[in-house]
Image (tube, rainbow, N blue to C red):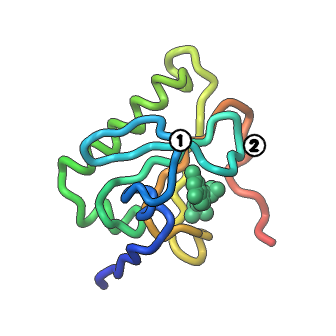
Amino acid sequence: MAYAYDDQNIFAKILRGEIPNNTVMETDHTLAFNDIMPQAPNHILVIPKGPYVCYDHFALEASDAEIADFTRTIGKICAELELQPGAGGDGYRLISNAGENGVQEVPHLHVHILGGRWLGRMLQKAD
Ligand code: 5GP
């Protein structure tokens, strides 16, 4: 099934410069910025610049260059914020919500990087 991308979503507006953001890192294919409602001391959203709705859409349809750039950017941010558990950091969590069951609010792929505090178990009991 083909995904329909809504170019009026808030992250598309951020990418077009219509809404400001607090940029953490920017590359040719990727933008990372602080979440407006942080859930942890470190809460960064990493988004591809291309029009991808969610992770599987990106993973199946993005170019190798986009995928490599996106993945490396996540790694560089974890390193820059000293979150890497293998290098003395306290660790982090990556989350990418997709669709209704995933409770995705913004229909442009984003990976949340959360860190800076103990994050608890992966899932809480659903309401
Ligand atoms: P989702 O629930 O789709 O995985 O996460 C969407 C995230 O986008 C939320 O954590 C929310 O706080 C964040 N967000 C929504 N609107 C804005 C905005 O205008 N600017 C920034 N920086 N973050 C936003």
Q: Which one is in front, 98 or 28?
A: 28
From the viewer's perspective, tell me whether residue 76 is left or right of residue 118.
Answer: left
Does 78 sit above or below residue 15?
above
At a point 26% along the width and 65% down the height, the residue shown is 60
**What is the distance, in whole Å, between disc 2 and disc 1 at their CAs?**
27 Å
At a point 47% along the width and 71% down the height, the residue shown is 9
At a point 34% along the width and 79% down the height, the residue shown is 3
| Circle on res. 115 | none
Quadrant of the picture in which ligand 1 is shown: bottom right
Q: As shown in the figure, which amino acid type bears the numbered disc 1?
A: Asn
Q: Which sits earlier in the primary sequence, circle 2 or circle 1? A: 1
User: Where residue 48 appears, x then y in whole percent?
Assistant: 35, 54
Q: As shown in the figure, which amino acid type bears the numbered disc 2?
A: Gly
User: Would you identify the image quadrant in which residue 43 lies?
Assistant: top right
Q: Ligand 1 closer than 8 Å to the CB at disc 1? A: yes
Does 99 sit above or below residue 45?
below
User: Where residue 35 appears, x then y in whole percent?
Assistant: 60, 48
| Circle on res. 22 | 1
Q: Which one is in front, 60 or 3?
A: 3
User: Would you identify the image quadrant in which residue 26 lies?
Assistant: top left
Q: What element carries label 1?
A: loop
- Which quadrant does the C terminus fall into? bottom right
Q: What element carries label 2?
A: loop
Q: Residues within 10 Å of mark 2 (few under 14, many from 20)?
A: few
User: Would you identify the image quadrant in which residue 44 lies?
Assistant: top right
| Circle on res. 120 | 2
Q: How crowded is mark 1: few (under 14 residues within 10 Å), some or many (20 or more)?
A: few
Q: Farthest residue in the left direction?
A: 64
